Image: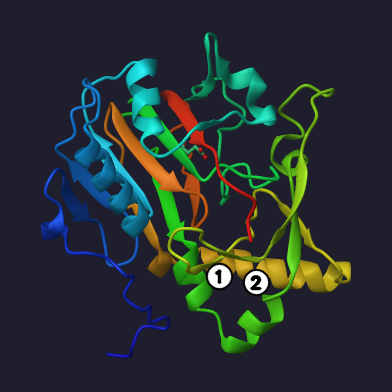
Amino acid sequence: MPAPEVTLSEPPRTSPASYRAIGVKPLNPTVGAEITGVDLAQPIPQNVAAELRRAFEEHMVIFLRGPAIDHEAHARLAKVFGKPHVAPSTVQWRVEGHPEVTKIHADGDSKYVAGEDWHSDMSCDPEPPMGSVLYLHTLPPLGGDTVFASMYAAYEALSDTMKATIADLRAVHSSAKSFGDKVARDLELPTSSHPMVRTHPVSGRKALFVNRGYTTHIEGLPAQESEAILRFLYEHVANPNFQCRFTWSSHAIAIWDNRCLQHMAIWDYFPQTRSGFRIQIQGDRPV
Ligand code: SIN
């Protein structure tokens, strides 16, 4: 049998057996793990919080399946990872009385769904959210999965020549590309320039940081060259070898790291309903 086209290095992970306070079951060798043993109805003990943060760092996206939670329990869980990020572009989806909570909802009247193309949340912001905590209470009978792709793996699988080409380049990320036709015309839509390769502030690993949802062009290159490189990178990041796919159940939660992942919500369930709430977590300026 021929060797796979892309061979990935083993990510630095501790053994699932080394977790004492929670259960951790990796979904594949590259990205994603299901977590068990967390009681979200109660304040989260320090040792559980510390292991949740370790699992998040090692697996980039972690999934919990649980009973229904309210906005307070959702906020308590998000706080384990940091302070809430309230993005200017999401004002129309905010939940009254809980500005940090945005509604994620699609049904038979929807013309679009949040995140239906590959993206890293709010990469248009100068300091994009480092993570997102998505809780879904209502699911279609079939479909509505979310796919996550490791941008460490995508970066590491590039040739040395492509790595050197993009090493010092920056790309522009625009909220208008993602939200321009969906929000009030007078809303201020942020645009930011970020390095195309960012170094994760916790792991120190390099991750590719351009995405089809928000990135408009590479700074300093003629339009045709910028388009050609971005088109190649967008195809490259969608390689299934870098991915995991999560099939939701009612009241499941996904917590992902936007600094080293892209994700895409699959809208294959129209006209069924899929509904829940998301809290984003403050991040820092990509370097
Ligand atoms: C998002 O992009 O934050 C939404 C993802 C999803 O609904 O699965």
Q: Which mark is residue 127?
A: none
**Does residue 110 sit above or below 265 in this rendering?**
above
| In the image, farthest residue toward the bottom | 2
User: Between 83 and 248, which is closer to the camera in this rendering?
Assistant: 83
Residue 199 in view of the camera: yes
Mark 1–mark 2 Cα distance, whole angstroms, equals 6 Å
Which residue is rendered at x = 79% and y = 69% of the image?
226
Residue 33: x %, y % from top left = 26, 52
**Helix, strand or loop under label 2:** helix
Q: Identify which amino acid the numbered label 1 is placed on.
A: His
Q: Identify which amino acid the numbered label 2 is placed on.
A: Phe
The residue carrying mark 2 is 232
Which residue is rendered at x = 27% and y = 33% of the image?
249
The residue carrying mark 1 is 236
**Does residue 178 sit above or below 221 in this rendering?**
above
Q: Quadrant of residue 275?
A: top left
Residues at discs 1 and 2 in contact (Cβ within 8 Å): yes
| In the image, farthest residue toward the front | 46
User: Between 14 and 136, which is closer to the camera in this rendering?
Assistant: 14
